[in-house]
Structure formats: C-alpha cells, structure tokens
Image: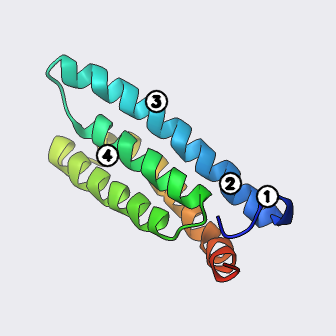
Amino acid sequence: MATDNASRSVGGWFLLVFAIILVILGLILAAGGIWLVTLGGSWYYLIAGLGLIISGGLMARDSLTGVWIYFLVLFGTLIWALWEVGFSPWELLPRVFGYIVLGAIVLALLPTLKRRQAAI
C-alpha cells in the first residue's frame, strides 16, 4: 500500500470502501457465474466477477492497474451485451448501466488514486 490506514484522507477512505464494494460485487457475480457455468450457461458472469475482484483488490492497494482492469471489464461487458441483445436500448440498459455508473465513480476516484500512488 502507498501509505498506512492512519494517513488516509477522506478520498482515500472512499477509495478503500469503493474497492471493497467492487470485491463484494465481484464475489457475488463470480459465485453466480460458477453456478451458470455448471448449468452450461454463459461464462460472462464468472469472468466479469473475477475481473471485479482483481480490480477492487488492486484499487484497495492503491494500484492504477485496478482502474485499467475495471475498464477492461466494462469494455468486455459492452461487447457481451451487444452480442447478446444487439442495439436494443431497453435490453442493453440493464446489462450495462450499473457498470457505467461504477465506471464514473472509478473516474472520479482517479485523482485520489494518483495522489496516493505518488505518495509511495
């Protein structure tokens, strides 16, 4: 970690909480993904869940690589959603909206992450 928990700013704490939320969401997606794969379904949820776990874990350790992995998951989600439903807005919305909102939060946390990384 760049610095210890005692020296975290408000933004640093928000980053840590957000990273933990990403890991929890990833665990939920991966668990559901494992179930789907055993039933012969899509591998998407397992892969996306693992990506969120890795991304959140890296962001919790103040690594910019976590941001890149998150946006790789977002890009993969967009590709998967388009492949699944085409360009139908009403069918795309529930598949990508949450990831886009989380992506906006990741972008908002980028300055905090860069500051924390510079403190190394």
With respect to residue 28, does 88 lie above or below?
below
Percent position of residue 54, x then y: 44, 51
Q: Which residue is mark 2?
A: 16
Q: Residue furthest bottom?
A: 118
Residue 21: % across, % down: 60, 43
Quadrant for residue 114, please give it: bottom right
Determine contact: label 3, label 4, CB under 8 Å. no
Q: Name the amino acid type tagged 3.
A: Ile
For the residues bearing labels 1 and 2, Cβ distance under 8 angstroms: yes
Circle 2 crowding by C-alpha within 10 Å: few under 14, some 14–19, many from 20:
many
How far from the left and from the top, in percent, is residue 103? 50, 60
Q: Residues within 10 Å of mark 3 (few under 14, many from 20)?
A: some
- Type of residue at label 4? Leu
Residue at 29%, 42% (x, y): give it.
47
Q: Is residue 54 visible?
A: yes
Colour convention of the picture: rainbow
Q: Which residue is mark 4?
A: 92
The dot on residue 28 is 3
Q: Would you name the residue on which mark 1 appears?
A: 5
Distance of mark 1 from mark 3, alpha carbons?
Answer: 26 Å
Q: Earlier in the sequence, mark 1 or mark 3?
A: 1
Q: Say which residue appears at 63% left-offset and 67% top-offset.
A: 109
SS of the residue under disc 3: helix
Name the front one of labels 4 and 2.
2
